[in-house]
Amino acid sequence: MTIHGLMRSTILAGMAAFAFGTSAQAADWRGWNIHPEGYPNTIALEKFAKDVTDKTEARVSAQVYSNAVLGDQPDAIDQVRNGALDFANFNLGPMGEFVPSINALSLPFLFSSVEQMHAVMDGEIGQRFSDDMSNEGIVALAWFDSGARSFYDTQRPIEKPEDLDGLKIRVMNNQLYVDMVDDMGGNATPMAYGEVYQSLKTGVLDGAENNFPSFESSNHYEVAKYYSLSEHLILPECVCISQTSWDALSPEDQELVRQAAVDASAEQRRLWAEQEKTSRAKVEQAGVEINEIADKTPFQEKMKPVYESFYESYPDLQPLVEEIQSTKVSG
Ligand code: BDP
């Protein structure tokens, strides 16, 4: 081939790659969301999808599918991992089944406050968690608030661990939560979120545990009239992207998507703070009895075996847990 011929074919190949590259880049992103319309996470995730679409000038066109219409949370995590779904808002509880170090966050009474959880997640430790998730094919771009989870049930106020005796309590999909409830004295039942309402109504379950916004939006408060402020779990949530979808983006678009997630998280945290109050007021008005637990020590004492068996399974994670516990809240 002459030098001209070579140049011409190189240019043609380049043009073809450019044309192909542009069309291959235009992506339709499907996003998983478990919550209904109007929930802080839904509003924030929709904002994320809109920002992504607008800022990339539709090189990525993102759409949120709410109410878990795309499947249960554990399935959805798996689908984001293998690239069948592009993005999602996940709770880091069920994530522990896929990324072992994330289980540290599911140790009951780990954080002393929601502020401490944010200090940990927004800092260097949070970065380590997102690195671990990324090794499993999930890119965590920002963290959402999920408040604190407490027990609620149809039978009686929970003031001490003995009050859980014999109660069938739904937990999210993670062995740590089964151990947590069983060691406190209840009977743990892992179940998909969408099945809990009916199970509470028919007596298949006596109770469950969640934050105020979810207790309200799931309508569980219509059937479970005792909400007891155990605040045993403070779980962060993520805006997560499939590594496959992420890797297909140009560095410029990755930056736009990252910024959209950071903005969505600021919006979610602002909405969350309001929703916690309105949801609490709404369930109280609907006749739910909210019980303060003056002394949580008896519940915490019961969690010693959960920590011990965690350290036995993951000796490497003990320093991380201690680092989290000693993180100070600044300001
Ligand atoms: C909500 C979380 C959601 C969980 C749900 C549950 O935001 O991700 O699926 O609890 O209990 O608070 O399953």
Image: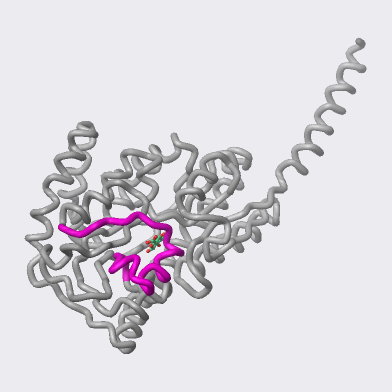
In the rendered image, the quadrant that contains the C terminus is bottom left
Give residue 170's quadrant in the image: bottom left
Task: Check the image and report above or below for 96 versus 145.
Answer: above
Q: Quadrant of ligand 1?
A: bottom left
**Residue 118 visible within the image:** no
In the rendered image, the quadrant that contains the N terminus is top right
Q: Position of residue 63 (x, y in %)?
A: 63, 60
Task: Check the image and report above or below for 151 versus 102.
Answer: below
Question: Quick check: 25 left or right of 109?
Answer: right
Q: Residue at x 21, y 52 (%)?
A: 180
Question: Quick check: 190 left or right of 30?
Answer: left
Task: Check the image and report above or below for 174 versus 272.
Answer: above
**Residue 290 visible within the image:** yes
The residue closer to the viewer here, 262 or 117, is 117
Q: Position of residue 185 (x, y in %)?
A: 16, 58
Q: Residue at x 18, y 54 (%)?
A: 328
What span is colored magenta in the figure?
185-211
Query: Is 222 included in the stretch rendered in magenta?
Result: no
The residue closer to the viewer here, 220 or 57, is 220
Task: Check the image and report above or below for 205 versus 316.
Answer: below
The residue closer to the viewer here, 137 or 166, is 166
Q: Residue at x 19, y 50 (%)?
A: 327
Q: Position of residue 329 (x, y in %)?
A: 20, 58
Q: Residue at x 50, y 75 (%)?
A: 38
Query: Is 190 included in the stretch rendered in magenta?
Result: yes
Q: How many marks?
A: 0
Q: Position of residue 114 (x, y in %)?
A: 26, 62
Question: Quick check: 13 left or right of 291?
Answer: right
Q: How is the image coloured?
A: one colour
Q: Residue furthest top?
A: 1
